[in-house]
């Protein structure tokens, strides 16, 4: 039941569905005779959509999440790191595309960063995680492993954890295999990193954040496009809200 509630919340409590719900509510209230109230709600919904799609708002909301942990350029001297752990995202294994295209943008960038860091210390393990929420689909960890092998990672250096379906389960799976207190480089999207670090620390691991897949602050304020609302900025706001709700949800997961 908790998983169902979490999935529904993620689908409904995002900017576009919220705007549509408030817009429909406003129109319905106006149709019932309370035109001023209905118009105010509908107008507020449109304003919310414009703000969520506007780069200054989306970047200011998402940017602090992505900046909480600095990127890792080189391995930290003196750290006894046993593994590079790449968290799962999405992929489409049924498409007739090369493996690099079957992984979505987030997955591809996470794996690319994980392999880059692993190459600096190839004696450690590269752990790839992630199952599918549908039993009929192959786990994304398998896609990661296939792509990693094509990038030159030996099979014996790969640790494939293909049963976790969320970040909390990924943290638990890594602890079960590597042991409590293990120091590791944790690779995931920059916006997801605060929540991922919280989960991995909660199960007794010693993660070092290695964020990638940055979305905020890519636009140039000196261009007109930066000041025009866009679907790209709406996705940033959606990501920020999703991670905010995810952090709130962790209070019921530990």
Image (tube, helix red, strand yellow):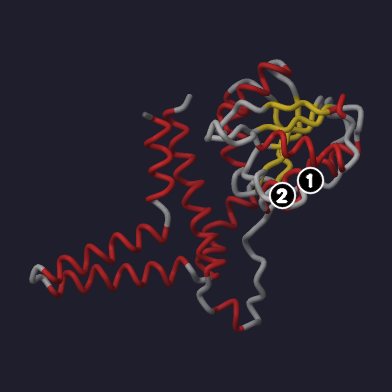
Above or below, comparing residue 57 to residue 100 in the picture:
below
Residue 235 located left or right of residue 197: left
Q: Position of residue 114 (x, y in %)?
A: 79, 41
Give the number of the disc on residue 212: 2
Residue 13 located left or right of residue 235: left
Q: Position of residue 93 (x, y in %)?
A: 67, 43
Residue sitting farthest toward the bottom:
224
- Quarter occupied by residue 222: bottom right
Q: Is label 2 in contact with label 1 (beta carbons under 8 Å)? A: yes
Image point 67% across, 75% down: which residue? 220
Query: Residue tagged by mark 1?
Result: 113
Q: Secondary structure at mark 2?
A: strand
Q: Position of residue 199 (x, y in %)?
A: 58, 30
Image point 62% across, 28% down: which residue? 170
Above or below, comparing residue 135 to residue 98 in the picture:
above
Q: Position of residue 194 (x, y in %)?
A: 59, 41
Residue in front for this viewpoint, 29 or 132: 132
Residue in front for this viewpoint, 19 or 198: 19
Image point 64% across, 65% down: which residue? 217
The CA distance from mark 2 to mark 1 is 7 Å
- Quarter occupied by residue 4: top left
């Amino acid at each position: 039941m908790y998983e169902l509630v979490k999935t529904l919340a993620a689908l409904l409590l995002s900017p576009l569905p919220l705007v549509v719900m408030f817009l429909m509510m406003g129109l319905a209230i106006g149709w019932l005779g309370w035109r001023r109230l209905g118009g105010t709600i509908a107008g507020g919904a449109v304003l919310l959509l414009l703000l969520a799609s506007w780069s200054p708002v989306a970047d200011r909301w998402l940017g602090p999440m992505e900046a909480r942990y600095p990127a890792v350029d080189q391995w930290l001297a003196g750290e006894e790191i046993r593994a590079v752990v790449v968290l799962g995202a999405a992929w489409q294994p049924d498409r007739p595309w090369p493996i690099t295209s079957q992984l979505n943008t987030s997955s591809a960038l996470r794996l690319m960063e994980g392999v880059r860091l692993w190459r600096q210390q190839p004696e450690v393990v590269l752990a790839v995680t992630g199952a599918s929420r549908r039993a009929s689909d192959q786990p994304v960890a398998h896609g990661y492993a296939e792509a990693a092998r094509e990038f030159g990672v030996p099979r014996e250096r790969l640790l494939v954890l293909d049963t976790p379906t969320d970040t909390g389960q990924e943290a638990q799976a890594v602890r079960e295999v590597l042991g409590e207190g293990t120091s590791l480089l944790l690779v995931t999207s920059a916006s997801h990193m605060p929540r991922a670090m919280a989960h991995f620390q909660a199960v007794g691991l010693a993660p070092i954040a290695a964020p990638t897949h940055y979305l905020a602050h890519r636009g140039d304020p000196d261009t007109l496009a930066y000041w025009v609302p866009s679907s790209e900025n709406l996705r940033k706001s959606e990501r920020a809200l999703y991670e905010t709700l995810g952090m709130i949800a962790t209070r019921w997961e530990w």
